[in-house]
């Protein structure tokens, strides 16, 4: 058994921050290996890439999530006490709560709400000189997901809640003032959510029984007790925040339609290409760079020893573009998804493994549904111009977006 290869330098935190989507895969290629060891935030960390690594990563007898995520991510993106930090039976039971919201009719209802928002926003877009698409989509998704969850949101609060939910995922990896602003946003959102949880339990709010607000407010853990209000608040935000974050995928979809304009006509002529198109956007466009776990008990893999307690990072983007799994991995080829067999370990933009038993994001189907709805609308229902602007994705950001957040001009509805 040999030692795990090491990255150069004592600590790789700054290198990772400068190149969040390429650091792990590029270092692995340089070392001719699937994994290497380094320090991230001074903590010894094993970094892995590829589908074989993903299969090991999602083996819950080897790795767990509790205690793996850096505190700054817990304090912003995830919150504390939520499903992402649970393992074993506790995780699977809590996961059932989210999966109960992911029925086909539920997801179709959310898609319908978003399409209704698009129809409401389109006349205003026509009247304006230009539209910052990312800003518009974030606000629409905030309105839609709150309505879908049974969360009352007064008109005067829409902009504030949109900005707060955005801060949770946009500034999760930030340092300095942005990080502290994101922590403040989480504090305020959790207080807001916890109040609603209490109002449901006391009968002051009466959302429909199938709504996320009611399901989460009344859910009981394995001990038979309802979730503490703060934990229930975190879980409610685990529905609201990721749905608003789909705005990133939607802007990336618009970016792909502009960069590969021949696909607009293809999509108008063949509805069957819609899902392959958005899946290729999810594969090729970066979203979240890596996920973390912790070795629960020492084990060996590929001749290397994983010590108990060691943190492990799995490279999401590098796995989605691994040439061992994908032909011409850096080329935009939606057709590859038309007949490709599903593999839960080589296509992992929102985590890998099984939705029910592993930590794969249950909201993945929501992301696909929303992307398809907005893509169809952009192709079939409106026309717009994309004039001179900086459309390069800022890959130093998490997640990466065009500098100007995709400006649309001269928007007009198709007859």
Image: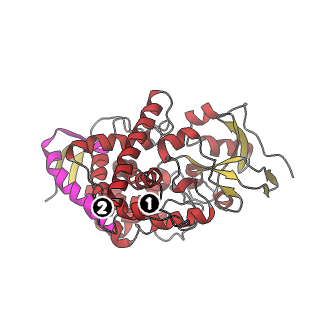
Q: Which mark is residue 363?
A: 1
Kindly identify which residue carries mark 2: 203
Question: Residue 310 in the image: x percent, y percent?
Answer: 72, 47
In front of the other: 216 or 348: 216
Q: Which residues are magenta?
A: 108-135
Q: Which mark is residue 76?
A: none
Would you say residue 121 sits in the magenta stretch? yes
Question: Residue 346 in the image: x percent, y percent?
Answer: 59, 60
Mark 2 vs 1, N-terminal side: 2
Badge 1 element:
loop
In front of the other: 124 or 382: 124
Residue 330 in sight: yes
Would you say residue 8 sits in the magenta stretch? no
Residue at the spot 49% in from the left edge and 38% down from the top edge: 395
Closest to the camera, between mark 2 and mark 1, is 2
Q: Label 2 to label 1, Cα distance in Å?
A: 28 Å
């Amino acid at each position: 058994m040999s030692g795990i290869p090491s990255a150069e330098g004592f600590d790789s935190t700054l290198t990772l921050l400068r190149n969040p989507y390429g650091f792990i895969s590029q270092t692995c290629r340089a070392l001719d290996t699937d994994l290497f060891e380094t320090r991230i935030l001074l903590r010894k960390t094993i970094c892995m890439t590829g589908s074989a690594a993903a299969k090991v990563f999602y083996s819950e007898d080897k790795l767990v999530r509790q205690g793996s995520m850096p505190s700054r991510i817990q304090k912003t993106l995830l919150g504390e006490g939520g499903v992402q930090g649970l393992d074993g039976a506790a995780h699977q039971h809590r996961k059932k709560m989210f999966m109960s919201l992911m029925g086909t009719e539920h997801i179709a209802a959310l898609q319908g709400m978003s399409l209704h928002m698009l129809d409401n926003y389109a006349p205003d877009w026509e009247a304006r000189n230009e539209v910052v698409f990312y800003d518009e989509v974030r606000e629409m998704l905030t309105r839609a997901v709150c309505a879908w969850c049974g969360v009352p949101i007064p008109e005067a609060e829409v902009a504030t809640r949109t900005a707060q939910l955005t801060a949770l995922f946009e500034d999760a990896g930030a340092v300095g003032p942005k990080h502290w602003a994101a922590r403040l946003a989480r504090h305020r959102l959790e207080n807001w959510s916890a109040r609603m949880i209490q109002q449901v339990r006391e009968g002051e709010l009466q959302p429909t029984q199938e709504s996320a607000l009611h399901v989460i407010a009344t859910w009981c853990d394995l001990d038979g007790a309802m979730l503490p209000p703060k934990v229930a608040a975190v879980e409610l935000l685990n529905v609201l925040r990721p749905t608003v974050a789909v705005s990133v995928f939607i802007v990336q979809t618009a970016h792909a339609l502009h960069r590969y304009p021949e696909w607009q006509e293809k999509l108008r002529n063949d509805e069957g290409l819609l899902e392959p198109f958005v899946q290729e956007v999810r594969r090729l466009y970066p979203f979240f760079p890596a996920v973390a776990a912790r070795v629960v008990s020492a084990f060996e893999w590929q001749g290397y020893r994983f010590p108990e307690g060691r943190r492990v990072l799995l490279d999401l983007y590098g796995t989605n573009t691994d040439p061992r799994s994908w032909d011409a991995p850096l080329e935009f080829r939606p057709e590859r998804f038309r007949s490709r067999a599903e593999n839960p370990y080589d296509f992992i933009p929102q985590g890998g493994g099984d939705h029910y038993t592993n930590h794969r994001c249950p909201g993945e189907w929501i992301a696909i549904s929303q992307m398809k709805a907005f893509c169809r609308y952009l192709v079939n229902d409106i026309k717009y111009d994309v004039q001179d602007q900086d459309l390069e994705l800022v890959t130093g950001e998490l997640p990466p977006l065009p500098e100007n957040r995709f400006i649309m001009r001269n928007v007009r509805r198709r007859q």
